[in-house]
Image: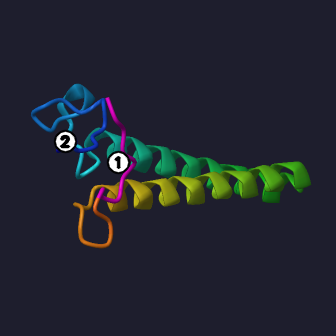
Amino acid sequence: MSEEPLRDPKTAADGTGAGGATKPGGGESAFTVVVAAAANLGIAVAKAVAGLISGSSAMLSEAAHSVADTVTELMLLTALRRSGRPADEEHPLGYGPGYRD
C-alpha cells in the first residue's frame, strides 16, 4: 500500500504556490520578509535617533523593540530558506511542514 507523499495544500500540481511563486526558493514570501526586515530596521534607527535627541527612554525602548522585530524577520527568512531543502535520508519528509489532503 503506497501513501501519497505529504505536500503543502497551497501548492499547485505544477509546484507553484499562490501567485505562481515556486515553493523551494521562498519566492514572494522571502521578498516580503526582506522588505519587512528592512522597514523594521529603518523604524528602529528612526526611533533610536528620536530617543537620543529627545532623551526619551520610552522611545529608546521602542527602538529596541523594533530591533527585536528585525531579528525575528531574519529568523523567519532563515526558516523559509531551510524549509525549501529537499528530503534526505535523515529527513525523509523534507525540512518544511507536511500536510495531508
Mark 1 is on which residue type? Ala
- Please tell me which residue lies in front, 13 or 47: 13
Which residue corresponds to the image point at 89% horizontal and 56% vertical from the top-left?
55
**Residue shown at 51% from the left, 60% from the top:** 75
Foreground mark, 1 or 2, reads 2
Q: Residue at x 28, y 55 (%)?
A: 84
Left or right: residue 27 versus residue 60 is: left
State left or right for residue 59 relative to residue 96.
right
Does dot 1 land on a helix, a strand or a loop?
Answer: helix
- Residue 67: in sight, yes or no? yes
Q: In the structure shown, which secondary structural element does the residue marked by tag 2 occupy? A: loop
Quadrant, the C terminus: top left
- Picture layout, residue 79 above or below residue 39: below
Judge by depth and name the residue closer to the eye, 3 or 73: 3
Q: Is residue 14 above or below residue 71?
A: above
Name the spot of residue 39 as percent of width and height, x first: 52, 45
Q: Most prominent secondary structure in the magenta stretch?
A: loop
- Crowd rating for badge 1 (residues with CA inside 10 Å; few <14, some 14–19, many 20+): some
- How far is the residue under mark 1 from the one under mark 2? 11 Å
* Image quadrant assignment for residue 27: top left
Residue matched to label 2:
22
Magenta stretch in the rendered image: 93-101
- How crowded is the residue under tag 2: few (<14 C-alpha within 10 Å), some, or many (20+)? some
**Percent of width and height locating residue 30:** 34, 48
Residue furthest to the bottom in view is 90
Q: Earlier in the sequence, mark 1 or mark 2?
A: 2
Tell whether position 35 is magenta.
no
The residue singled out by tag 1 in the image is 30
Q: Which one is in front, 87 or 3?
A: 3
